[in-house]
Image (spheres, rainbow, N blue to C red):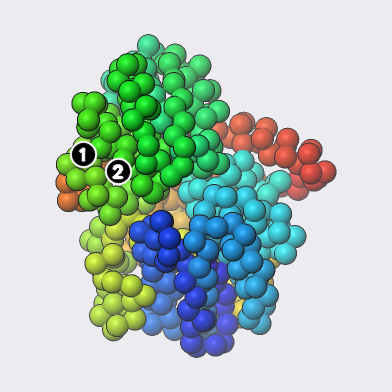
Amino acid sequence: MYRAATSGYTGRGRDKRHLREGALRFLGIPQADGYIAYLTLLNERDGGINGVKLVWEECETVYDVDRGVECYERLKGKGPTGAAAVNPSSTPLAYALLERATQDQIPLLTSGFGHSDTSDGRVFPYVFTVPSNYWSQNTAKIRFIGQQAGGMEKLRGLKITHVYIDSDFGKETLAILDQQATRYGFAVQHLAVQPPGLDQKATWRQVKATQPDWIILRSVGVMIPTALKEAAQIGFPRDKIVGPSPTCAEPEMVRAGEAAMGFICTTWYGTGTHFPLIQEMLQYVYARGQGAGPEGDVGTAPWIRGMLRGLLTTEALRTAMRAFGHQPLTGAQVQWGLEHLTLTAASLKEMGAEGLISPITLSCRDHEGGGGVKFQQWDGTQWRVISDWISPDQALVRPLVEASAAKYAQEKGITPRDCP
């Protein structure tokens, strides 16, 4: 987990370690390094934001919720105004920090993950799922499968098997898949895999018996290469398996070897080093020896994910400064900046980030932003983009978000905010 703040201090915060140990370090290390690299770019190239230097601090959670909460409590009040924003490292930790951060008035950026109903800013004013929550990403998966089938009407009668890790993360999209199955007329089978996902033989025997048309794989860590190898063993084509953005980790594809060939992954970001913004990071950060990790991680999926979380955080700071001045900001001020954040196609191109993320617009009501989803395929050495930005089905997702958020508000005795 990492927190960011603006301060007159020109150095770094203490360099604690964030998910650099444990089974998920292959995701945590490059993600943290990408985040730090972006903040370093702004300090090195621009002198910070409007002359105010950025500081940050990270701490090791080892994907453990209790350690993550302890880290949050220890870091939330540091600096002249306290934490301007916090980026939790996992869905379980995001759940655990939800009420604390709201009480402390510190924005949580759960970019592309976390609890999907926190996209409703009326009930969750300090949680931001920008640019796309898990429910939205799942509707984009079904739209992608519909495109491959020749149209959404062709989904009727198809069999889709959902192989998921039996955790909060894995269960997050069960209900939305059932809703889509009813709407489009396909059959969905849910198969749970016990963490960490090393033993999947019985699961894939069921897959072989069912012979689905597509598989939606909801996995993380060692479950990913294990699933792909088991799919290869039963002869199920990997180009009919679609995974979520956390599975887009190059090291796990390498571990799967030939079994990963053709695997399709959902992503809310671009990958590679060809973007002008990333070329500037190589010039101003890595060429000067300021990179937090190896240059070889630059442009990989988890590194990009962390870098974009840094971009979203700092653009919220920049937006807030227009209203509150060029000075260190409080969490409440940054929350205002997030709710007034808009990244247009033109502004992204000016930043050198065209294609890295889709245009977004946040508001008091909408903490997701309407971001698009792309699909990429593993060719044996790298990810290859195979779709344009696909818009999630907000006509389906938003009512579900609002209903779930309203239920939460009722259970907690929360009065939702009035939003324009």
Above or below: residue 337 compared with residue 51? above
**Circle on res. 259:** 1
* Labels 2 & 1 near each other (Cβ < 8 A): yes
**Between residues 374 and 86, which one lies in front from this camera angle?**
86
Q: Is residue 370 at all visible to an observer of this figure?
A: no
Q: Is residue 413 at all visible to an observer of this figure?
A: yes
Q: Position of residue 324 (x, y in %)?
A: 65, 73
**Between residues 360 and 249, which one lies in front from this camera angle?**
249
Q: Residue at x 56, y 87 (%)?
A: 8
Q: Report whether 1 appears left or right of 198.
A: right
Label 1, residues with CA under 10 Å away: few <14, some 14-19, many ≥20 = many
Q: Amino acid at mark 2?
A: Pro
- SS under mark 1: helix
Answer with the quarter of the image where residue 23 lies.
bottom left
Sequence-first disc among 2 and 1: 2
Label 2, residues with CA under 10 Å away: few <14, some 14-19, many ≥20 = many
Between the residue at mark 2 and the residue at mark 1, the CA separation in whole angstroms equals 8 Å
Answer with the quarter of the image where residue 356 lies.
bottom left
Q: Position of residue 343 (x, y in %)?
A: 46, 56
According to the image, label 2 marks what residue? Answer: 225
Q: Amino acid at mark 1?
A: Ala
Q: Residue at x 69, y 65 (%)?
A: 332
Answer with the quarter of the image where residue 272 lies.
bottom left
- SS under mark 2: helix
Q: Report whether 382 appears left or right of 187.
A: left
